Image (tube, rainbow, N blue to C red):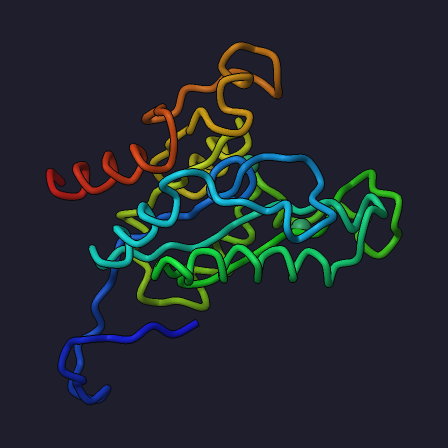
């Protein structure tokens, strides 16, 4: 994905490598409204303020990378193409509001899935850090020492500890149920807040003071 850049172009050979902080964003319940397995693309809707929050990361020189577990294909609900279409829809809804993701990664696997192709124990299903490591390999500009995970599940918070990032649990999606002990398990994130809007404010502040 490319976005327009207003700065004066520098020739690659004279540029010193510069690294940017990175926020690994969950999808369902963090960027878009949690509504189970989304079969109709029209049912994918952004959470209020999510595009503004991503745009704020963009304008602050912070990478925004989507990391998502998507088991709909492994459960036989829809094809892997549909997962890609959902991700593309999300990217389009963000782009409509001038907000951009630096990259998108998804894990389609499930150890106890019903579709053989996706039924496996992998190293990329959150909280395993496989997709985050792939992002670091493919994007040398990402600064591992200034990294964050924003998500609504205990597995997002665990992903953060598994890849050395700071964790922010949002109370949209399953966040409240997680901390009420009604879903997955309770966790101790570095920060817990209402939504991605406040999460990004906290990230910006903590980068300023670091
Ligand atoms: Mg989620
Ligand atoms: Zn996987």
Q: Is residue 183 toward the left or the right of residue 210 in the image?
A: right
Residue drawn at the location 82% of the way across and 43% of the way down: 75
Quadrant for ligand 1 reads: top right
Residue 3 against residue 204 in the figure, above or below: below
Q: Is residue 159 toward the left or the right of residue 63 in the image?
A: right
Taking depth in this image into account, of 71 and 82 the one nearest to the observer is 82
Residue drawn at the location 84% of the way across and 57% of the way down: 117
Residue 177 rendering spot, x and y as whole percentages = 55, 17
Q: How many marks?
A: 0
Residue 1 against residue 49 in the figure, above or below: below
Displayed quadrant of residue 203 = top left
Taking depth in this image into account, of 177 and 112 the one nearest to the observer is 177
Q: Residue furthest top?
A: 180
Q: Residue furthest left?
A: 209
Residue 102 rendering spot, x and y as whole percentages = 40, 63
Residue 39 against residue 192 in the figure, above or below: below
Residue drawn at the location 82% of the way across and 46% of the way down: 77
- The C terminus appears in which quarter of the rendering? top left
Displayed quadrant of residue 94 = bottom left
- The N terminus appears in which quarter of the rendering? bottom left
Residue 6 rendering spot, x and y as whole percentages = 18, 75
Residue drawn at the location 48% of the way across and 44% of the way down: 46
Q: Is residue 160 toward the left or the right of residue 44 in the image?
A: left
């Amino acid at each position: 994905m490319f976005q327009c850049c207003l700065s004066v172009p520098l020739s690659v050979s004279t540029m010193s490598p510069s690294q940017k902080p990175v926020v690994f964003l969950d999808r369902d319940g963090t960027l878009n409204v949690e509504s189970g397995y989304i079969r109709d693309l029209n049912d994918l809707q952004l959470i209020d303020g999510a595009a503004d929050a991503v745009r704020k990361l963009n304008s602050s020189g912070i990478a925004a990378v989507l990391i998502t577990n998507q088991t709909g294909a492994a459960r036989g609900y829809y094809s892997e193409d549909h997962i890609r279409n959902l991700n593309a829809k999300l990217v389009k809804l963000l782009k409509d509001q001038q907000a951009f993701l630096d990259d998108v990664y998804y894990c389609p696997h499930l150890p106890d899935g019903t579709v053989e192709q996706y039924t496996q124990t992998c190293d990329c299903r959150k909280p395993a850090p496989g997709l985050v490591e792939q992002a670091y390999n493919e994007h040398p500009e990402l600064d591992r020492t200034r990294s964050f995970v924003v998500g609504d599940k205990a597995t997002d918070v665990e992903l953060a500890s598994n890849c050395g990032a700071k964790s922010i649990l949002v109370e949209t999606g399953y966040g409240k149920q997680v901390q009420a002990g009604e879903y997955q398990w309770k966790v101790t994130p570095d920060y817990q807040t209402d939504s991605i809007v406040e999460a990004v404010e906290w990230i910006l502040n903590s980068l300023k003071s670091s």
